Image (cartoon, rainbow, N blue to C red):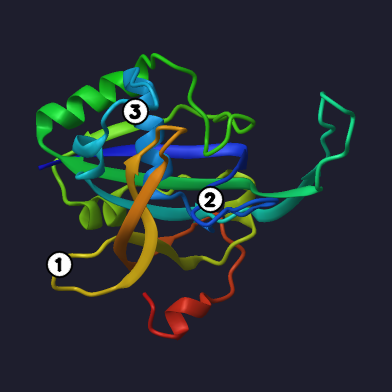
């Protein structure tokens, strides 16, 4: 199996998995449905096109730079009668950097890599107002999702590295093996069709990736002290 490594970095990102009505939340890390949607757009698929083949790929994401939560609000006026619509709140992750890994047959992964390098549609990080600030494609490797997330270089910005300790552990969230249990999240993409948008449940587990940080300022890693590393 081959794994595609994707860099998700930008001024703002938003990866909602439970957004409803006037509140549009974001998870602390990119969702599988969001990254699959990004790959489908790179390939030129329409929202009404099937995505079962992409949804079956194994997925994981590593939090290289968590960023900070940003809240915005929007007001709108109905054009037909000028009536104000309810105030809506939208949440974003500012200055975050993530490493996503997608694993599948080599031919499929190679095709996705080509699509990222030459996307058909504009690509964004969860919402159209969130363009990437760095190239998305990193590499393809012959490793599992777990091993790829453990071995890949740290993608955090230099200013962020200088504020961290000499050693730290990065949180990763990945698809759970059938026998591994895990937490359930409603993040398995079934259809992106605006008239029938549908998501199923997927089971996820966490792992912690130890990182050496020569640019760090010393100190200690709390997760390492708790045994997370």
Q: Which residue is mark 3?
A: 40
Judged left or right of residue 141, residue 47 is right
Q: Quadrant of the N terminus?
A: top left
Residue situated furthest bottom in the rendering: 226
Label 1 vs 3, first from the N-terminus: 3
Residue 81: horizontal and vertical position, in percent? 87, 28
| Image x and y of residue 153, in percent | 37, 47
Q: Nearer the viewer, residue 181 or 77?
A: 77
Mark 2 residue element:
loop
Residue 93 horizontal/vertical position (percent): 63, 49
Alpha carbons under labels 1 and 2: distance apart: 25 Å
Is 149 situated left or right of 225 in this image?
A: left
Q: Which quadrant holds the C terminus? A: bottom left
Task: Identify the residue position indicated by label 1 in the image.
Answer: 178
Q: Label 2 near label 1: C-beta < 8 Å?
A: no
Q: Position of residue 195 (x, y in %)?
A: 45, 34
Sequence-wise, which precedes: disc 3 or disc 2?
2
What residue is rendered at 83% in x and 39% in y?
A: 75
């Amino acid at each position: 199996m081959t794994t595609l490594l994707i860099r998700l970095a930008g001024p703002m990102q938003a990866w909602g998995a439970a957004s409803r009505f006037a509140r549009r939340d974001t998870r602390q890390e990119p969702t599988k449905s969001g990254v699959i949607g990004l790959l489908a757009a790179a390939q030129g698929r329409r929202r009404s096109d099937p995505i079962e083949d992409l949804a079956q790929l194994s997925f994981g994401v590593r939090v290289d730079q968590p960023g900070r939560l940003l809240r915005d609000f929007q007001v709108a006026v109905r054009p037909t009668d000028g009536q104000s619509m309810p105030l809506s709140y939208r949440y974003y992750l500012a200055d975050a950097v993530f490493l996503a890994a997608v694993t599948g047959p080599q031919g499929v992964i190679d095709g996705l890599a080509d699509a990222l390098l030459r996307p058909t549609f504009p690509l964004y990080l969860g919402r159209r107002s969130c363009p990437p600030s760095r190239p998305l494609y990193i590499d393809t490797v012959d490793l599992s999702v777990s091993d790829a997330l453990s071995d890949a270089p740290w993608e955090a910005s230099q200013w962020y590295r200088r504020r961290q300790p000499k050693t730290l552990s990065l949180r990763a969230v990945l698809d759970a093996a059938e026998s591994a249990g895990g937490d359930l999240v409603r993040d398995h993409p079934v259809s992106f069709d605006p008239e029938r948008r549908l998501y199923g449940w997927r089971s996820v587990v966490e792992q912690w990736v130890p990182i050496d940080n020569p640019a760090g300022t010393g100190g200690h890693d709390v997760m390492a002290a708790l045994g997370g590393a």
